[in-house]
Every structure is written in C-alpha cells, then in structure tokens.
Image (tube, rainbow, N blue to C red):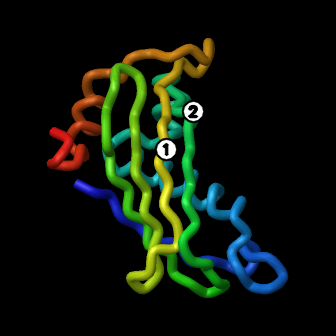
Amino acid sequence: MAFTTARPLRFGDCDPSGIAYFPSYLNLLVGVMEEFFASIGSPWPVMMGERRISVPTVRLDITFSHPGVHGDLLEFRVDVKRVGGSSLDFLHRITCGGTLLWSAEQRVVATDTDTHRARPWPDDLRAALEHHLEASNV
C-alpha cells in the first residue's frame, strides 16, 4: 500500500529562473519520510528520541524527468519495496498534475542512535513496514 502526500514547490525551493533547485527536493523528501514514519505510528521524535532508532539513508538514486517550477504542487508516492533485517528500500515517484518530475530509489538502515550501528527492526515497526509492502513483493 503506497503512502501519498503533497508539498508545494515554494519560492525558496527554486533557483533564480523559477525552476526547482535539486537540493531542495532532498529536503522535501526528508519531510515526506518523516511524515511516512509518523503515519505508521512511529513519529521520528519518539523513534529517535525515546526508542533510539535512527534511519540514515545509505543509498539514493535519483532520476530527474521533468523540471518542477515555483508554484507546482508536488505529489509524492512512497512505495515500500523491501524490508530487510535492518534495511528498508523505498521507491519514490514525484509528480505534478500527472507528469513525472523525478523518481528515487532509496535505502535506509535502522541504526542505534547512540552507536550508529545497524540494528534489527523492532517487531512492531517491522509489521507496520511490511503492511506497506507492494503486493507484488509479498
């Protein structure tokens, strides 16, 4: 089951010509990931603060297909592709009005916030993540 949300492309996200500045896309993606984890019952302040679980990105492959411009409403679709022992693979598709602007394949790893070493997903978090696996991957 895909997670979806939307974000406006604001003036500060764009270069002087009004086209999206690609590092801003990464900042928006971090916010979307934070919203995704909150939607599965694991908001980052609790996950990182109380449970001491961080989710750093270890791989990110982005393909830019069409420029976004100031004022666009970016529609984010997040698919969970794989849940590993401590890793998690996402496919992101970002569109505006049905046009694909960019896509990304991302791998995050559950780590101990204090030691920065990989750790297994806790059972409750694993179950929530697996609930979002694409049907074709189950």
Q: Residue at x 63, y 63 (%)?
A: 25
**Closest to the observer, 7 or 133:** 133
* Frontmost residue, 88 versus 128: 88
Q: Is residue 128 left or right of residue 93?
A: left
The kind of residue tagged 1 is: Gln
Q: Is residue 65 above or below residue 62?
A: below
Q: Which residue is mark 2?
A: 58
Disc assigned to residue 67: none
Residue 23 image point, x, y percent: 71, 59
CB within 8 Å, label 2 to label 1: no
How far from the left and from the top, in percent, is residue 55? 52, 33
In the image, what residue type sits under mark 2? Val
Tell which circle, 2 or 1, labels the residue nearer the N-terminal end: 2
Q: How would you rate the neighbour count of disc 1 (Cα within 10 Å): few for under 14, some for 14-19, many for 20 or more? A: some
Front-most of residues 92 and 42: 92
Q: Give me the residue at 73% from left, 81% from top.
A: 11
Q: Secondary structure at mark 2?
A: strand
Q: Which residue is mark 1?
A: 106
Whether 18 is drawn above or below 74: the answer is below
- Depth check: give the residue in front, 31 or 93: 93
**Which quadrant, please, contains the N terminus?**
bottom left
Residue at 54 percent across and 71 percent down: it is 65
